[in-house]
Amino acid sequence: MKATVFVLAAFAPMVLTQSTLCGQYDHFSANGYDFNNNNWGKGSATSGSQCTYVQSTSTSGVGWRTTWAWAGGQDKVKSYAYSGRQIEKKPVSQYKSLQTKTQWSYNNTNIRANVAYDLFTAADVNHDTSSGDYELMVWLGKFGDISPIGKSQGQVNVAGTNWELFYGPNGQMQVYSFVAPNAMTSFNSNLKDFFDYLTKNKAFPASTQNLITYQFGTEPFTGDKTTLSVTQWSAEAS
Ligand SMILES: *[C@@H]1O[C@H](CO)[C@@H](O)[C@H](O)[C@H]1NC(C)=O
């Protein structure tokens, strides 16, 4: 009996967690990737909490998950828990490729939240990384009656998908958000194509705007306890 118990324990499935981030700005870095629980907007909630769990990191990609529940502050973002790629900051025009790949799922989609890339650019290469002169968002998922900053500019085709493009200001920052027609839970694309689209069609100044962040995560507004699992995320910048 004793031996059996020992064998079962040895083969019990293990969920390895490299780091648990529950504080407002708890963060972790490894293998060229950063993670942040980033509960920047939690003050607008009447209740709730969020923790982010880093599960695996290697130079070829990362796995992580974040669990949250937020109530109140209906149209306010509570957080942006993310995985980020550490990059050499330089003008967007000098990147040949911003190839990235992900697989993700939400275990409860009766929520109001997005799943999105967030990239800031700034003329000043030393600009604070919590904002920029421009923000490029690529929404792979949109759950509930939420929408990006600004107004719809209609459908645009980039990297083989018809996205709805939104544009508007957030303070001093100009925000472009490409929203997927349906949740894209598997995604493998070159984000340089989105900057090329903006350069060609929206006069985005790619030769003077430095890429300062390269992140992927989720912006919850409200919802009961739910988990975003990012089984795989990798991002290259060259
Ligand atoms: C989603 O997963 C979390 C734990 O990670 C759990 O607490 C929650 O109940 C799950 N939600 C659903 C709808 O299964």
Image: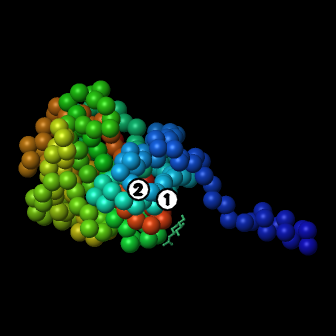
Q: Quadrant of residue 126?
A: top left
The type of residue carrying mark 2 is Thr
For the point 9% across and 47% down, the residue is 202
Q: Nearer the viewer, residue 40 or 58?
A: 40
Q: Is mark 1 within 8 Å of ligand 1?
A: yes
For discs 2 and 1, the disc positioned in front in the rendered view: 2
Q: Residues within 10 Å of mark 2 (few under 14, many from 20)?
A: few
Q: Earlier in the sequence, mark 2 or mark 1?
A: 2
Q: Is residue 153 visible?
A: yes
Relative to 56, say whether 145 is above or below. Answer: below
Give the class, few, some or many, for how many residues have Cα within 10 Å of label 1's Cα (few <14, many ≥20). some
Q: CA gap, disc 2 to disc 1?
A: 17 Å
Residue 109 is situated, as x and y percent measured from the top left of the image, at 39, 71
Q: Is mark 2 within 8 Å of ligand 1?
A: no
User: Which residue is located at x 63 percent, y 59 percent?
Assistant: 15
Q: Which mark is residue 128?
A: none
The image position of residue 116, as x and y in percent, is: 32, 56
Query: Would you say 179 lies left or right of 63 here?
Result: left
Question: Which quadrant, please, contains the N terminus?
Answer: bottom right
Q: Residue at x 30, y 48 (%)?
A: 118
Specify whether 97 is left or right of 36: left
For badge 1, the amino acid type reads Thr
Q: Secondary structure at mark 1?
A: strand
Mark 2 sits on what residue? 46
Name above or below for residue 235 compared with residue 159.
above
Q: Would you say the residues marked 2 and 1 are in contact, meaning their CB atoms lie under 8 Å apart?
A: no
Position in image of residue 130 (x %, y %)? 32, 38
Q: Which residue is mark 1?
A: 67
Give residue 203's position: percent from left, percent from top.
8, 43
